Amino acid sequence: MTDIKLKDLRYLVAVADARHFGRAAERCFVSQPTLSAQLKKLERYLGVQLIERQPNNVSLTDAGGQIVDRARRILEASDEVVTLARAHRDPLAGRLRLAMLPTIGPYLLPRVSQSIRRALPRLELRLYEYQTVPMLQKLKAGELDLGILALPVDLEGLEARKLFCEPFTVAVPQRHRLAKRERVQPADLEEETLLLLEEGHCLRDQALEVCSRVGAGESQDFRATSLETLRQMVATGAGITLLPELATQGAYGDARGVVVLPFAKPAPVRQVGAVWRKTTARRPAIDAVCKLIADQAG
């Protein structure tokens, strides 16, 4: 077993992900002949075919698929060894791969990024944006260190921490019947046309949960890809929507043709939290970033 090199496992995983020898070689910064030769050598050593090679088609054998699953875990563990060593030298330095939901990142980052840079100058944040399901998958696969998203979520192999509660607001057209109100009750939304994000956004499910209690109906001919699209559609008079509070502040607080109204207390809220792998070696940096976010956004 000592003859199997981590490098060869990385080549195999790259081919599994790319389904193409050339693109896999580019990812691994080697030539295609080198990558192909090393994988054939690995197959000879193991005594089993891992890859089916056909013109314009690369796929894994059953054995190859099972070995790739284990190779990913081995590579993740090897990366954790390196990260753990670096963390012991300086736990608040080095790269931290941070992902946020598309409905959180653009509105939270302006509030917290300067504080993080000032407090953690040696920490190199790599920022990503994913919806909940792919974010959790990448966290579990070791491709991300920390995720900021709406709780609760499935925490198999993961840990979570609540950061802050974010109230929902109602965005209505400027000439809407509710536009002059100081606050609205959920019951005020009865029989309104509700504009929502497309499937896959957890904010869509949360908005539906709030409005289903009072009989607000979802628009059946429109699904938005972003909160900014929702905001613009509200401005045209197509309907109303729910926006998380952070998305109504700062540069986003004065959208033309849109009036944002808070809910009367107790306002519906979403719980924003942080999620990371239980086995992570970056816990000190994660704790520091989480504290700064909670302090600034809470």
Image (cartoon, rainbow, N blue to C red):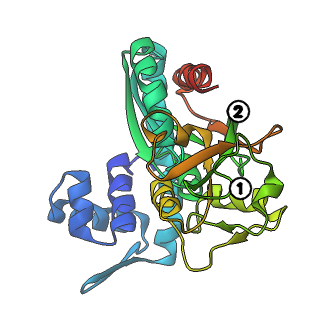
Please say if 173 is above or below 159.
Answer: below
Residue sitting at x 37%, y 15%? 121
Q: How many marks?
A: 2
Please tell me which residue lies in front, 53 or 84.
Answer: 84
Give the residue at x 54% y 71%: 223
Q: Is residue 174 visible?
A: yes
Q: Nearer the viewer, residue 150 or 11?
A: 150
Helix, strand or loop at disc 2? strand
Q: Which residue is mark 1?
A: 206
Most extreme residue toward the bottom is 55
Distance between the Cα atoms at labels 1 and 2? 17 Å
Residue 277 is at least partly visible in this image: no
Residue 111: give x, y in percent of width and height. Answer: 48, 27
Q: Which residue is mark 2?
A: 162
Label 1: element kind: helix
Residue in the picture at 71% in, 55% down: 206
Q: From the top left corner, tell me how far across and down residue 252 is, in percent.
A: 46, 41
Which circle, 1 or 2, is nearer the viewer? 1
In the image, residue 174 lies at what x, y percent? 54, 54
Q: Which quadrant: the C terminus?
A: top right
Q: Nearer the viewer, residue 57 or 255?
A: 255
The earlier-in-sequence mark between 1 and 2 is 2
Query: Which amino acid type corresponds to the residue marked 2 in the rendered image?
Result: Lys
Query: Along the horizontal axis of the image, is 37 left or right of 190?
Result: left
Asked if 165 appears above or below 187 in the picture, the reply is above
Residue type beneath disc 1: Gln
Position of residue 19 measured from the top left corner of the image (x, y, whole percent): 34, 72
Residue 82 tag number = none
